[in-house]
Image (cartoon, grey):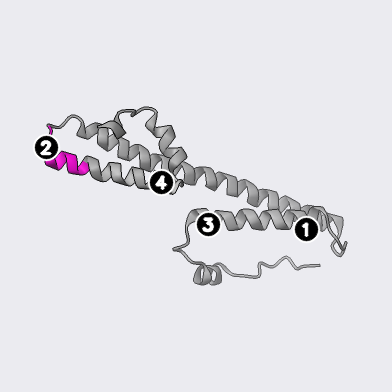
Amino acid sequence: MPNNKIIISREEFDSYHDSAQSVALFLSHVSNYCYVQTSKYKYPKHKQESQRYRNGQLCGLRYIEDLYIHFFKKERALKKEFVDSLYSQYDTLSTLQESEYKDGIINAIDSLLRQLVNQHEFSTVIDETKKGNKDFFTS
């Protein structure tokens, strides 16, 4: 039976963890880990651990899955906030007089949004935000 000591220290984790790794990829690894481990403890091939231990593992995995869902939603909200800020800037620019400078800013924002839509990562978030700014892509 495993001991109750945390095997890897926070310092050791931080030294090996790639901080440049995307949040989406990190959360994907967490989700995959939980799926595999939940299956392992829900449907054990060998009953080496006691039922109480397996129940504890499943409880811990449910906690991790809840954290995963919380941070997944938080990351999605952050993307939406970013896109909302771009559209807000566009709304602010619409009050300025027509000029090449204004056109340059609008084209920079438009180009980024189009690139993100093409990558499909942000497409759902942009579609949700775009509903309130239907004329953005037509100006």
Mark nearest the camera among 3 and 2 is 2
Is 46 contained in the magenta span?
no
Spot occupied by residue 24 in the image (x, y as percentages of width and height): 51, 53
Mark nearest the camera among 4 and 2 is 4
Of the image marks 4 and 2, the number of the one nearer the N terminus: 2
> Residue 21, relative to residue 105: is it above or below?
below
Spot occupied by residue 121 in the image (x, y as percentages of width and height): 46, 47
Which label sits on residue 99? 2
Spot occupied by residue 49 in the image (x, y as percentages of width and height): 84, 62
Residue of label 4: 118
Residue of label 3: 25
Of the image marks 2 and 1, the number of the one nearer the N terminus: 1
**In the shown orientation, is residue 70 left or right of residue 51?**
left
Of the image marks 3 and 2, the number of the one nearer the N terminus: 3
Give the structural element (helix, strand or loop) at label 1. Answer: helix
Separation (CA) of disc 3 from disc 4: 19 Å
Q: Amino acid at mark 3?
A: Leu
Give the structural element (helix, strand or loop) at label 3. Answer: helix
Q: Determine the image quadrant of residue 111.
A: top left
Q: Which residues are magenta?
A: 98-105
Which label sits on residue 40? 1
x 41%, y 38%: residue: 126
Of the image marks 3 and 4, the number of the one nearer the N terminus: 3
Q: Could you tell me if the residues under marks 3 and 2 are in contact, i.e. CB atoms within 8 Å?
A: no
